[in-house]
Amino acid sequence: MIYNQVNRTMTETKKIIKDTFFEGERSLFATNDLRLENVKFYPGESAIKECNNIEAYKCEFMCKYPFWHNQNAWIEECLFTVYSRAAIWYSQNIRMLNTRVEAPKMFREIDGLYLENVQFTSAGETIWNCRDIKMRNVKAYGGDYIFMNGQNIEIDGFYLQGNYSFQDAKNVVIRNAKLDSKDAFWKTENVTVYDSEISGEYLGWHSKNLKLVNCKISGTQPLCYCTNLVMENCTLASDCDLCFEYSTLEAVINNGIVSIKNPTAGFITANSIGEVIIDNNCKNPGGCNIRTQKDACFA
């Protein structure tokens, strides 16, 4: 990556601070071209605010708001304790590797964020209003409302426990994930999920252009009020009832569907289909072709 090459070149000219500590407010305010090694930041605020080209290696953060208004920060093998809430906001080009984050509200208004082998233990309200995000092998616990209003997100290898994830997000690709998340993907646009497990009630409501490929889905009333929903080679658990209400979709399900309610248009194909509810509230009765795999072969 270009970011890696730039960072290695800049490291040769950086001032190095190591094996020490800082406390209080704005201890390294507006500092440029600095490498921190084994540095502890004790209680205080805004320790590394308004900085450029900062590297932090094996550092521990116990202060609030340490990285605000930063450009080009490389963070590796660090610890952000529960006291370092709202640690990185309003910044550009942030790279974090092999790091543990115990603080909530991490990352707001970031342009250019790369995370690899990062674990969040209290990820509530994390990664909000961020753009151009790439993630690999990340785990997030307690992640309610994670990725709110995010744009241009690529994820490979992700475990999430937290509700209301990805609300209003746009242009997202997720691979090899396990998401335990009620109300995931509400009002999203242009989201594709491959080879993943998604568990939680009310999946994908009011989404546009949501595509699920080789996914296992569980939870009541999934995928309602969707526009242009596509499902390929997916399975639905036995608790997935009242599916697809008021949705337009093209769905191929590899097992049975317990119940379907008032789909609007497109087609649904499954190995078996249980109850089909088309009531007086259906917007377009008969507009969606509902059929078994056997029926589709003879169509």
Image: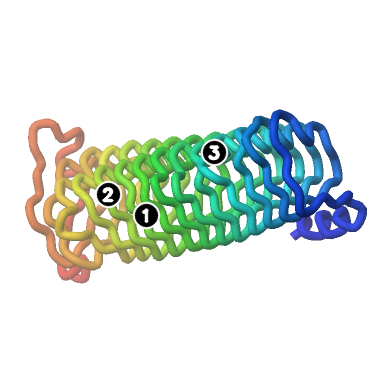
Q: CA distance from mark 3 to mark 1?
A: 27 Å
- Tell me the quarter of the image containing the N terminus: bottom right
Q: Which mark is residue 200?
A: 2
How much space separates mark 2 and mark 3, taking CA atoms?
30 Å
Left or right side of 29 for 90: left
What residue does disc 3 label? Answer: 83
Q: Would residue 299 be visible to someone looking at this image?
A: no
Circle 2/circle 3 CB separation < 8 Å: no
Find out whether the residues at labels 3 and 1 contact each other: C-beta distance under 8 Å.
no
Residue at 16% across / 58% down in the picture? 257
User: Does the rendering let one see residue 80?
Assistant: yes
Where in the figure is residue 89, as x and y percent of width and height? 63, 34
How many numbered badges does the structure rendering display? Answer: 3
Residue occupying the point 46% across, 37% down: 125
The percent position of residue 193, horizontal first and vertical second, equals 42, 56
The amino acid type, in three-letter code, at marker 2 is: Gly
Give the numbered dot on residue 74: none
Q: Quadrant of the C terminus?
A: bottom left
Earlier-in-chain disc, 2 versus 1:
1
Q: Are marks 2 and 1 in contact (CB under 8 Å)?
A: yes
Nearer the observer: mark 3 or 1; the answer is: 3
Instruction: Tell whether 21 sits left or right of 258.
Output: right
Q: Is 45 displayed left or right of 184 in the figure?
A: right
Which residue is denoted by mark 1 in the rendering? 179
Q: Where 135 falls versus 34 (above or below)?
A: below
Q: Would you call the spot at circle 3 few (<14 residues within 10 Å), some (14-19), or many (20 or more)?
A: some
Which amino acid type is marked by label 3?
Tyr
- Assign a secondary structure to mark 3: loop
* 41 displayed left or right of 128: right
